[in-house]
Image: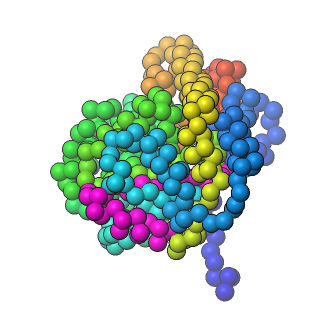
């Protein structure tokens, strides 16, 4: 029977990582897979995570199952981190999931459970896994215009034009901050206009927030999510702890579903628990327990925030250095957008051929759509990349 299986298309980002690894050149730069790396190219375990793990190791008395929704302390701490008290707690149902991917998947599943023919609108481009999950599920995906290749910024009027096509009961997927893959984000005025439009259309926003703390800071990065969630009747939020806690492999995420009325929350929660039960029963606990331990201990939390802030400002400094270097070499402000983008990624907006030349001639690896992971750089490699970009342009 297994002989009927067909080859699956390789994940482009994961195969890029393999190609980088196999490249024998000594001076090579990996701007591919979306994992934070420090100046030495290392993805460290954060100090607060190590400490929380040590405490859990010393104090944990049982590994018996948690509830289907995971540890309530994790849900409470994350609801607070993301929403900061802007939405009544009794309207929020929360489900621990394996990573932000699991939260996205269960969010789509919940929407489909509520409305079997649900359509999901997504930015063009978006994180490719959004699209492949929707396709795999057989859920209709509708793109809305988002990125303007010319300016490398958001084409907001284009976006609003597309969103005019949204119908009642559609889901509109938005990135909470640090848009992946472009790095281009909506302003707070633009968020207000999108919120008003979705409310008018009777559509439900679904916010994917995978990089809180990587853009303008923990609070600022949650502002769009809070502004939307506090003003619409219903909303889904998929949060990931992979990046901001650096616990990628622990698979830690939370799906939040905000119901219009508190009276609906129990049914919403029961349906979410049901989805976990049908998929893997209980969600992973270790990462969730680490996160809850950190967020509920003032000392650990302060240390985590300080380390996260170093990560964030380090990436901002690299952005500024790269934009300045490119301004100097090209004598234009064509690349000024790199310093305006936020998060781990920027989409350069150059052709696949140029991406290819950067790989072949300079051993610089970025995703084919010209997404680069800023954290793959350091102060020494920024000028190398800038020179290579200018040369590859010729
Ligand atoms: N959403 C977006 C936009 C992402 O970039 C990612 C990570 N690449 C995720 C969700 C999910 O990450 P994870 O499952 O590792 O938590």
Q: Where is residue 106 in the image (x, y as percent from the top left)?
A: 47, 63
Q: Where is residue 109 in the image (x, y as percent from the top left)?
A: 43, 67
Q: Which residue is drawn at 22% across and 61% down?
A: 168
Question: What's the magenta region?
Answer: 249-276
Q: Nearer the viewer, residue 70 or 7?
A: 70
Q: Residue at x 71, y 57 (%)?
A: 61
| Snapshot quadrant of residue 394 | top right
Residue most extreme to the bottom: 1
| Snapshot quadrant of residue 110 | bottom left
Q: Nearer the viewer, residue 236 or 268?
A: 268
Q: Tell me if residue 58 can be seen.
A: yes
Is 302 left, or right, of 151 in this rendering? right
Q: Which residue is drawn at 39% across and 49% down?
A: 207
Report the label total.
0
Q: Using the image, determine if residue 392 lies above or below residue 143.
A: above
For the stretch drawn in magenta, the main secondary structure is: helix
Is 241 left, or right, of 170 in this rendering? right
Q: Where is residue 230 in the image (x, y as percent from the top left)?
A: 29, 44
Q: Which of 181 and 23 is in front in this view?
A: 181
Q: Using the image, determine if residue 83 lies above or below residue 103.
A: above
Q: Position of residue 319 (x, y in %)?
A: 54, 24
Q: Residue at x 68, y 82 (%)?
A: 3
Q: Tell me if residue 183 can be seen.
A: no
Q: Using the image, determine if residue 46 lies above or below residue 280.
A: above
């Amino acid at each position: 029977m297994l002989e009927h299986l067909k080859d699956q298309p390789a994940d482009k980002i994961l195969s890029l990582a393999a190609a980088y690894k196999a490249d024998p050149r000594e001076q090579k730069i990996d701007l591919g897979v979306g994992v934070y790396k420090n100046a030495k190219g290392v993805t460290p375990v954060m100090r607060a995570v190590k400490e929380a793990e040590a405490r859990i190791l010393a104090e944990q008395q049982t590994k018996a199952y948690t509830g289907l929704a995971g540890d309530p302390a994790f849900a409470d701490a994350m609801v607070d981190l993301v929403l900061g008290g802007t939405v009544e707690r009794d309207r929020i149902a929360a489900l621990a999931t394996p990573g932000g991917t699991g939260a996205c998947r269960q969010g789509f599943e919940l929407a489909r459970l509520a409305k079997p023919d649900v359509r999901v609108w997504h930015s063009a481009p978006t994180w490719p896994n959004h699209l492949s999950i929707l396709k795999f599920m057989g859920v209709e995906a509708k793109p809305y215009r988002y990125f303007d290749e010319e300016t490398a910024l958001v084409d907001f009027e284009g976006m609003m034009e597309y969103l005019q096509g949204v119908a009642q009961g559609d889901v509109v997927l938005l990135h909470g901050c640090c848009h992946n893959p472009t790095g281009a984000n909506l302003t707070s005025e633009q968020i207000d206009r999108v919120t008003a439009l979705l409310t008018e259309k009777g559509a439900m926003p679904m916010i994917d927030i995978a990089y809180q703390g990587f853009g303008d800071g923990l609070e600022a990065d949650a502002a769009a999510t809070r502004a939307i969630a506090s003003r619409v009747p219903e909303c889904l939020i998929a949060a990931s702890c992979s990046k901001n806690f650096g616990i990628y492999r622990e698979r830690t995420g939370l799906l939040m579903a905000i119901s219009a009325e508190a009276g609906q929350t129990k049914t919403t929660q029961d349906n979410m628990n049901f989805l976990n039960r049908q998929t893997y029963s209980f969600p992973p606990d270790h990462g969730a327990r680490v996160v809850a331990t950190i967020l509920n201990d003032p000392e650990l939390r302060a240390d985590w925030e300080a380390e996260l802030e170093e990560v964030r400002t380090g990436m901002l400094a690299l952005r500024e250095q790269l934009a300045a270097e490119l301004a100097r070499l090209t004598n234009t402000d064509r690349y000024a957008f790199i310093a305006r983008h936020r998060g781990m990624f920027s989409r350069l907006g150059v052709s696949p051929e140029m991406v290819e030349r950067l790989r072949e001639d300079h051993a610089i690896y970025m995703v084919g759509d010209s997404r680069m992971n800023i954290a793959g750089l350091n102060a020494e490699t920024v000028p190398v990349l800038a020179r290579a970009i200018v040369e590859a342009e010729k």
